[in-house]
Image (cartoon, rainbow, N blue to C red):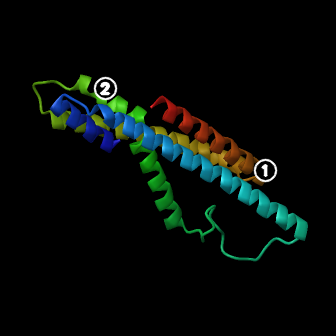
Amino acid sequence: MRAHACRSHRAVGHRSAVPGGLRHVKLLGAAYLIYLGVRAVTTARQVAREHAAERETGSQGPAAAPQTPSGGPSSSVARWRSGFSQGFLTNVLNPKAALFFLSILPQFVEGSGSTTRQIFFLGILDVLIGIVYWFALVTVATRLSVVLARPKVRRRWELTTGWLFIAIGMGVAVGA
């Protein structure tokens, strides 16, 4: 959100936005959605193949370190970095957030005060509201994690969201 607040400050200061800039952000966002969707679908299929192979051989596989969906060893730091980078890219490449900060936020800026201070205050306020919202969402998601821990449910969830991301990404790309 801070990145969008900075962009809106620049747009208010110059009173013009780059016309092709939003199209580029849309296309990058569409490509990222498609990438996330393809990754989710391939991961779900790979895990399904591994489970089928384990059932056929009757073994549970080697007792090795837990693996991440990409196949590497799992660690809390690596998962945190991956989650943070995915969230950051999703936010920065989200054209709706950019449109919000570029079109709605400047309306609340008074011409007599410091534009920079007002935009950053409104950006910080948005971040604080977002923190409360995300804490509530994480609380609900934590309860849902019990259901999503089941392999069949997890696979269906990954396939559904993967194909949904691909479809949305294609729609955004076509609309850009």
Residue at left 61%, top 53%?
Answer: 39
The vertical placement of 44 against 22, above or below, is below
Image location (x, y in percent) of residue 129: 39, 36
Image location (x, y in percent) of residue 73: 60, 71
The disc labelled 2 sits on which kind of residue? Answer: Ser
Residue at left 75%, top 47%?
Answer: 153
Q: Quadrant of residue 47?
A: bottom right
> Callout 2: helix, strand or loop?
helix
Q: Earlier in the sequence, mark 2 or mark 1?
A: 2
Q: Where does the N terminus fall, quadrant-wise?
A: top left
> Callout 1: helix, strand or loop?
helix
The residue singled out by tag 2 in the image is: 103
Inter-mark Cα distance, 2 to 1: 43 Å
Q: Is residue 53 left or right of residue 10?
A: right
Q: Is residue 14 left or right of residue 36?
A: left
The disc labelled 1 sits on which kind of residue? Answer: Lys
The vertical placement of 92 against 105, above or below, is below
The residue singled out by tag 1 in the image is: 152
Q: Where does the C terminus fall, quadrant-wise?
A: top left
The vertical placement of 18 against 151, above or below, is above
Label 2 close to label 1 by CB (< 8 Å): no
Image location (x, y in percent) of residue 86: 48, 52
